[in-house]
Image (tube, rainbow, N blue to C red):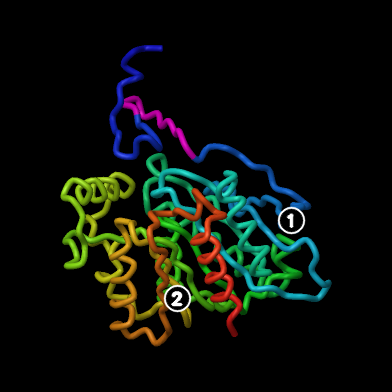
Amino acid sequence: MDSNNNQVAHTLFYPRLLVYKDGRVERFTGTDFTPPSLDDPKTNVRSHDVVISQEAPISARLFAPKIIHPHQKLPLLLYFHGGGFVAESPFTARYHNHVNSLVSAANVVAVSVHYRRAPEHPVPAAFEDSWTSLKWVASHSGGNGSDDLLNRHADLEKIFLAGDSAGANIAHNLAIRVGTRGLPGPNLEGIILVHPYFWGSKPLKSEKIEASVRSLVDSRWRFVCPTTDGSDDPLMNPARDPNLGRLRCRKILVCVAEKDKFKERGLYYKEVVEKSDWKGVVEVVEAKDEDHVFHLLNPTCDNAMAMLNTIVSFMNQS
């Protein structure tokens, strides 16, 4: 291979990935594939993969309890994985197991979305793919959609959008989009934002973050979204979104971690949402002594189990 092909152009996301000057992208994490299962003996959850769109290649993994009464309808969880918009997928062991656990504990149906990732597909591709996925879910409202599981067992009057990190960012922005564009048919009950990937050009008074770290976060956002004006882009900074009060859900759960550099942004999100015209309820829970997406790295630790139980309670509350 020509040595020029090995020249690195970007290291902003190393050790997750490298971008070479010839345009190649090499990912080092989040590339494993766990197959779906018709019978997970540990969780009693079944899963299968679907294609949502051929035009923009969007796929998803669907999960449901193995045993559902023939006429039973369950709440639907639409999940968006994290990874800084550049890495991971619903098919890695980490995310397959996480959504499996949510479905088992909450007794819901879940759709875990595989949106296109930067840098090959810069933001806003991830948002457009996620919106397409939500509309695909909505197409099952009359029981005539393309997936039989959703037709028979998904209660589209009770949809939750959820995600971690970049996926939490997507979930929030989709709830804004539902409020501004509308989504005939289903009802968006709530959103679950785990360690949300929000930022801003100026530090909050409560933030104690080194300038080099702030610069890295700013640079990463510009890298994944080359058309952005910066970290005050409403996609990244909800406080700058004039449509914040049009969130289309009645309740929000925000999970933060004490050692996470994005923690203060999650707390600030509650503050700015409550000051907007939105009339719902925001709940924030904090995991002590934990860092960003700790629950994916150590899913059986006490704090991860506590967070799982909080999410389950949030979805099961009437």
Looking at the rendering, in which quadrant would you find the C terminus? bottom right
- Circle 2 packing at 10 Å, graded few (<14), some (14-19), many (20+), is many
Image point (59%, 46%), residue name: 91
Residue for badge 1: 46
Question: For this rendering, which residue is in front, 165 or 9?
Answer: 165
**Picture quadrant of residue 110:** bottom right
Main secondary structure along the magenta-highlighted residues: loop
Residue for badge 2: 252
Q: Is residue 105 magenta?
A: no
Amino acid type, label 1? Arg
- Circle 1 packing at 10 Å, graded few (<14), some (14-19), many (20+), is many
Question: For this rendering, which residue is in front, 167 or 317?
Answer: 317
Amino acid type, label 2? Ile
| Alpha-carbon span between mark 1 and mark 2 | 28 Å
Q: Earlier in the sequence, mark 1 or mark 2?
A: 1
Q: Is residue 21 left or right of residue 254?
A: left
User: In what element is the residue under mark 1?
Assistant: strand
Q: How many marks?
A: 2
Q: Is residue 193 left or right of residue 189?
A: left
Q: Is residue 24 magenta?
A: yes
Expressed as whole percent of the image width and height from the top left, the position of residue 63 reads: 68, 58
- Determine contact: label 1, label 2, CB under 8 Å: no
Looking at the rendering, in which quadrant would you find the N terminus? top left
Expressed as whole percent of the image width and height from the top left, the position of residue 48 reads: 71, 52
User: In what element is the residue under mark 2?
Assistant: strand
Image point (41%, 39%), residue name: 120
Question: For this rendering, which residue is in front, 228 or 265?
Answer: 265
Task: Tell me which segment is drawn in magenta.
Answer: 20-29
